[in-house]
Image (cartoon, rainbow, N blue to C red):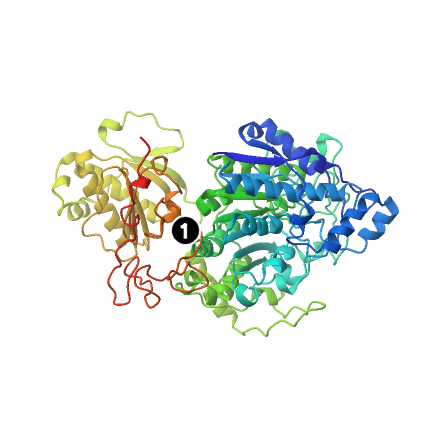
Amino acid sequence: MGTALVYHEDMTAARLLWDDPECEIECPERLTIALERLRQRGLEQRCLRLAAREASEEELGLVHSPEYVALLRGTQALGTGELQALSGQYDAIYFHPSTFHCARLAAGAALQLVDAVLTGAVQNGLALVRPPGHHSQRAAANGFCVFNNVAIAAKHAKQKHGLHRILIVDWDIHHGQGIQYIFEDDPSVLYFSWHRYEHGRFWPYLQESDTDAVGQGQGCGFTVNLPWNQVPAPHLRLPPRAPHPARLPCPTAPGLLSVAQDILPGLPPEAKPRGEDATAPLAGSNTDTLWPQVGMGNADYVAAFLHVLLPLAFEFDPELVLVAAGFDSAVGDPEGQMQATPECFAHLTQLLQVLACGRVCAVLEGGYHLESLSQSVCMMVQALLGDPPLPLSGPMEPHRSALESIQSVRAAQAPHWMSLQQQDAAPVLSPSTRSPEGSISPLLPGGPEFKAPVVQTEAQAVVALSSLLDQLRLYPTPPLRTAVALTELDAALVLPPDVLHWERSAPQKEMQAWARPHEALAQDKSFNALGKVLYLLDSILDGQVSSGIAATPAPAAAATLDVAIQRGLSHRAQRLLCVAVGQLDRPLDLADDGRTLWLNIRGKEAAALSMFHVSTPLPGLLKGCDPVTWRRLGWTSQNGHRDPAPRAGVNRPRTGRPRQCPEAGPASTRRPESPLACADGRPCSPRPGSKQLSESLTPPS
């Protein structure tokens, strides 16, 4: 299985036929330049190329009304004046005689990608499409969007393939209100969106884009909105609906692709201007207004995934991940004004691939700086193909505004999700209802009024934010990236110039105290290696070194690891992940208290010996799903795949409901001290194929 790339050149046919500064950025070059860059890097050739098909009107009807589809069909016969008049009836939309055909291809490409992934033809893929879709509603075009491609794909996956749980991740910089409206009462679709909000003063100016919009009815808790409220300097802000001063016209010359060196550090030299100020306007803009990048960056995006999206996603346990992949959230884009570099989207994609057995379908949404868009698309495709992502640049510490938003959405979602209830999250004054000056923002026109916020002092807010930052564990990068502690026999190895060969050792008395219980550490060579390991470990925990590699004599490996674990737990480390490759057994005295997770990679069979002790073969030896997807201790079917539908007497993890024991009936619940516990506290017997997975999971001969 590989990665699909779905595209059709006909999607470049629609273009703006009249002067409209608001709409001119949605141009055919968005696709052609992205595809050209994929070819230049050899990425298109590595993908399974699929030519997009048109979605049928019946398939469009999964989301859109027949009257709306008929209206769009009629645009094929309209003249320019009639098209302009019709476009004026919608918000930020232009129609072209080819719009209906292009939009059907865009929706069809998403359907084709979902079919390819769910039938096993490919593992994942990207639909490179236009027009985008996530703003489109049942009977209205909106924000460059004609048909809601991702929503149609989700409905199709449910109807044709029988899926019960679909995760939609919308990282476009604008709120995908169209997707939210379509699924707001549907518990089978978990919709996550981050978006520039500016306390309700950024398009589409909706109250329901805020954190307190969590869904309706049975879908309550399945809509997750994370608003970004960091705004440009007041004297640079735009009035509502004014043409954006940094619009990027579709370029006709190569020179129009460049941006300031400091704004896009990851771009190749030919794409960067030389000797220009970092606050210079984007090349090709129609104004001299300066637009410094002040929005969210890599650390903010990663923190949002780690502390909002992923906890909910693991609890929801999706069978398919759809990504509304808008790259106007990348650095350099005139719409978003964010700071996240293209390689950040490779990391985000990689994080999503641990869900749904890696079944990830991305569909292009926004992205209006052509170089930033094309670079970000390439980074995402590389991640889908399995290439390791490039390291993230810049400080990995979230903005205060991002922490406020993360804290607010966690508080809003906590009543619906066990993964958030288990962590202390003191609610703070909702940042989305306050202006940057601290006063209550004026109500937006139309819609219900905001709920009255809970008043808290500034000191209380600071304490809550500091607590969240401590949870995030995102601190300044240590001064030394990598250090190695080698034995004498290994010292002759040639190391890269930026890796320090560590010669220092822990104090003698401390080494003796740690080594005393272990006979294997009595030998001089093992004892000296232990001293280097302890000193390196302390330097990492104290923030002086980012990472390290240590060598120790083989007979002392288990004892050294045992000491390192105990030292880490007694010196600042709150939680510790230990990955042991090969025949290393878990220390017998290691408490099963939730502070350590022991993952042993060896052998040919998988075993979940406890909630915090898991053994798995190498991924290449395991049939069926990736081991991460059955990590929940025995919830597999006989063939090793997780059951797609709930069984009688078993609750799938959803909005805070406890999972029930498969054997004991509805009265039993999951208890923290046991992976699956019956009502009387006894550990349940594993289902067939759970604790020691059955022979169906043995490697092929």
Which element type, helix, strand or loop, lies under badge 1? loop
Residue 376 in sight here: no
Residue beneath the point at 72% across and 46% down: 246
Amino acid tagged 1: Asp
Image location (x, y in percent) of residue 356: 46, 47
Task: Please rate how many residues cluster around mark 1, counting C-alpha atoms within 10 Å: few if below 14, some from 14 to 19, many from 20.
Answer: some
Relative height, residue 136 to residue 421 (above, below): above
Image location (x, y in percent) of residue 518: 14, 44
Where on the picture, by quarter, is residue 116? top right
413 with respect to 562 (left or right): right
Between 683 and 131, the one nearer to me in the picture: 683
Between 57 and 659, the one nearer to me in the picture: 57
Between 406 and 209, the one nearer to me in the picture: 209
Identify the residue under disc 1. 643
Image location (x, y in percent) of residue 43: 56, 30
642 with respect to 360 (left or right): left
Relative height, residue 50 to residue 232 (above, below): above
Residue beneath the point at 25% across and 39% down: 532
The number of numbered discs placed on residues in the rendered structure image is 1
Residue beneath the point at 46% across and 43% down: 358
79 with respect to 259 (left or right): right
Where on the picture, by quarter, is residue 469? bottom left
Residue beneath the point at 49% across and 65% down: 411
- Point out the image quarter for the C terminus: top left
Residue 432 in sight here: yes
Image location (x, y in percent) of residue 67: 75, 55
